[in-house]
Amino acid sequence: MKGTSRWIRWLVPLALLVLWLGVGGALGPYAGKLGEVATNDQAAFLPQNAESTRVLEARKAFERSQSVPAIIVWQAPDGRVVTDAQQQEATRAIAGLAGKQGISGQPSPALPSQDGQALQAVVALAPDLGDELPAVLEEVRDAADSVPALKAQIAGPAATQADLADAFSGIDGILLGVALAAVLLILLLVYRSLLLPLVIIISAVFALGLACAAVYALADRGVVRVDGQIQGILSILVIGAATDYALLLAARFREELAVRGDRTTAALAAVRRSAGAIAASAATVALGLLALLASDLTNNRALGPVGAIGIAASVLSTLTFLPAVLALLGRTAFWPASPKPADATAEGHSVWRRVAAVIDRAPRRVWASTALLLCVLAAFSPALKSKGVPLDEIFVNDAPSVAAQETLGRHFPGGSGQPVVIIANAAKASEVQAAARATDGVATAAPVTASGRPGNGEPLVVDGRIRIDATLKDAADSDAAKNAVAQMRTRLHAVQDADAIVGGYTAQQYDTQQTAARDREVIVPVVLGIILLILVMLLRSLLIPVLLVATVALNFLATLGVSALVFEHLLGFSGTDASVPLYGFVFLVALGVDYNIFLMSRVREESFTHGVRQGVLRGLTTTGGVITSAGVVLAATFAALMIIPLAFLIQIAFIVAFGVLLDTLVVRSLLVPALVIDIGSPSWWPSSLARGQGHDPAETVPTGTRGERRG
C-alpha cells in the first residue's frame, strides 16, 4: 500500500505536468495569433445607443460603396500660392488611381484653400484592406507626390488606421518579451534562484496561451471584439496576475517544505492554505472586469469577458501546473538557495521586522500620517481631465497622419475631412440646413448630392431622408467642436418633423465622453459592492472589509492626483481618454485589494493563535517580502505597456504601475496594519476574533504538522 501511495504521489503531479505541456504546445501559438481576429476600426467600439452610432448606420444608405477616406493635402513651400496648373496636375495625378486595387470610386478633384497656399482631395479606400492598407496608401502617396513643387501628406481615417496598425505591429512578440524579461529579472534578484523564476514564467506563459486560445475562439465567432489595446492589456494582465499568484503559492510552499520536509505534502498544504486567498483575489479582479458589461461602450464590454478569461486561466495554471512542478522538484526549485525552518517563522526578514516595530510603537501616528499623505495627493485628482485625447496627442511619436492633419488645419477649416453628418427627413431639408449653418462654430453645411459629395446640386434622397455634411471651424477633436455639435443637436431636434440625427467623428467623440461619464457612475459602485461582498465572505467580518475598500479607493484617488500632475506637467498630455479613469479604477482597485487579501487572510490566520496585535505583526512580517515582490512585478508588467506609442496605453500603464506601488508600499505595508492594530479586536466584528477568542473552527491543521491550529 505504501508503494502504491508513493506511485500515486508521483503520478498525479507528473500527469498534470504532461497535461500542461500539451496545453502549452497546442495553445501557446495563439498568444501570437490574436492579431488575426483583432480590429483597429474605432467605429466598432462606439456607444451602442448613442445618436452618432445611429447616424453611422443610417449614412450607409447614402454611400455607393463602403469606404474609408484618405485626405490628401498639398502645401506650397514658403507660403507661396498654388497655381491653377498645379491644381489641375494634382487632380489629374490622383484621377489615375480610379479602378486600382483598394481604391473605391473616383477620387475627388483637388480644391484650393481660402488662403490659396494648399490643396485638398479625398480618395476613398476599400474598408477591408487589412494588412494591405499601408501598401495602398503608399500608392496614393506616390501619385500625390508626382505634383511638382508641392509637398503632399495624407490625413483622415485611413491614415490614422495605418498609423494605429503600425503602433500595434509586433505587439505580440515585443510586448510579451519586454514584460517577461522584466518579470524574470525581478524574480532573479528577489529569489536569487535560477530555477524557480523560470518555473513561474513558464506557468504564466501557459496561462497566457490558454487565455488567448479561448479569446481567439470567441472573437473568431463574433462573441467578443478584440483590438490592439485589449490585446496588449490581456497579455500584461495574465503575465502580472499569474506571476502574483505564483509568488504567493511558491512562498507558502517554501514555508511548508521547511517545516514538513516532504515535497508532495508541502505542495498540497501550500495549495490548501493559499487557494482561498488566490481565489478571492482572482474573483475581485474577474468580477470587477465583468462589471464592465454594464458599460454602453463596446470596447469596455469587450474587455470585461476577455480580462476575466485571462484571470481564470492564471488561477488554473497557478493551482495545478505550479504545485505539480514544485512537488516534483522539491528543494531543487529554490537552488542554489535552500528553504530553512526560520523562513517559516514570524521572525521574517529584518526589513519587515523593523516596519512592524515602527507600526507597533505608534499605530495611530502611522495610519494618520499615511492617510493624510494620500488625502493630499487625492486633492489633485479633479485636475485629471478625461475629456478625450486630441488627435495630435493620440500617438506619442511623430505619426504621419497627425502631421498631415495639422497641415490641413492650418489652411482649411479645423473640421475639414471630419464633417458632422446630419441625417434628416427630405421634406425639411432647407430648415435643417439653415439651422445647421446658424450654429456657432459651423463653417459650411451642404446636402450630399447624387455625385456622393456635398454641394449645391439636387440633394440625394434615400427613403425620404437626406444627408447633410457640415464642416466645423475648429479642429474636429477640440472642445469647441464638441460644444458646436451639442448646440447643433439642440437646434436640429427642435425642427418639427425633421427627425434629424447628428453624427460624424466629433459627435462620436462627444458621445463617447458622455457615455464614459455615465459608465463611471454605474460601474464604480458595482465594483466596490462586489469587492466588499467578497471580502466579507473571505474575512467573515464587516468592519475590516469596509476599511479595506475605503483604503484602496483612497489609493485610487491619490494615484489620479499624481497622474494629473505627471500627465500635464511632465508628459505634456492635455487630457486623457474618456475611458482611462474607469479602466484605471477597475484594475487598480481590484488588483489593490489583492494585496490586502493576501495580507489580511494571513493576519486572520495568525490572529486566531496569537491574538489580533501579534497576528497583524506576524502577518505583515511573513507576507511583506512576497507581497512587495508581487507588487513590483505587477507594476513592471503594466509599465511594459509604455513601449506602445499610444497615449491611452501609456496613461493606463502609469496609473496602474504607480498605483500598485503606492498600494503595496504605503497602503498595505503601513496604513492597513496600523489601522487594524489601533482598532484592535473590534475590527474583526462580528467574527469570534472580535471577542478575543483564539480558535477558528473553520480549519484545523492535522496533528503533527506544526503543533498548532490556524484559521
Image: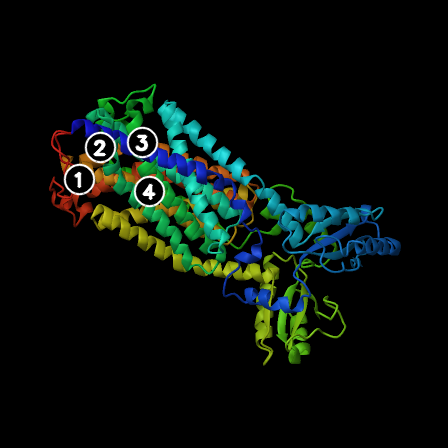
Find numbered disc 1 in the image and state the secondary structure of the residue it sits on.
loop
Amino acid type, callout 1? Gly
Residue 509: quarter of image: bottom right
Q: Disc 3 or disc 2, which is closer to the eye?
A: 3
Quarter occupied by the C terminus: top left
Is disc 2 surrounded by few (<14), some (14 to 19) or many (20+) residues within 10 Å? Answer: many
Closest to the observer: 406 or 465? 465
417 with respect to 625 (left or right): right
In the rendered structure, find residue 618 and report the number of the disc placed on it.
Answer: 2
Give the mark nearer the N terminus: 3 vs 2: 3
Residue 652 x %, y %: 48, 45
Residue on which the image places disc 3: 14
Residue on which the image places disc 1: 711
Is disc 1 surrounded by few (<14), some (14 to 19) or many (20+) residues within 10 Å? Answer: many
Is disc 4 surrounded by few (<14), some (14 to 19) or many (20+) residues within 10 Å? Answer: many
Find numbered disc 3 in the image and state the secondary structure of the residue it sits on.
helix
How many discs appear? Answer: 4
Q: Disc 1 or disc 2, which is closer to the eye?
A: 1
Classify 335 as above or below 576: above
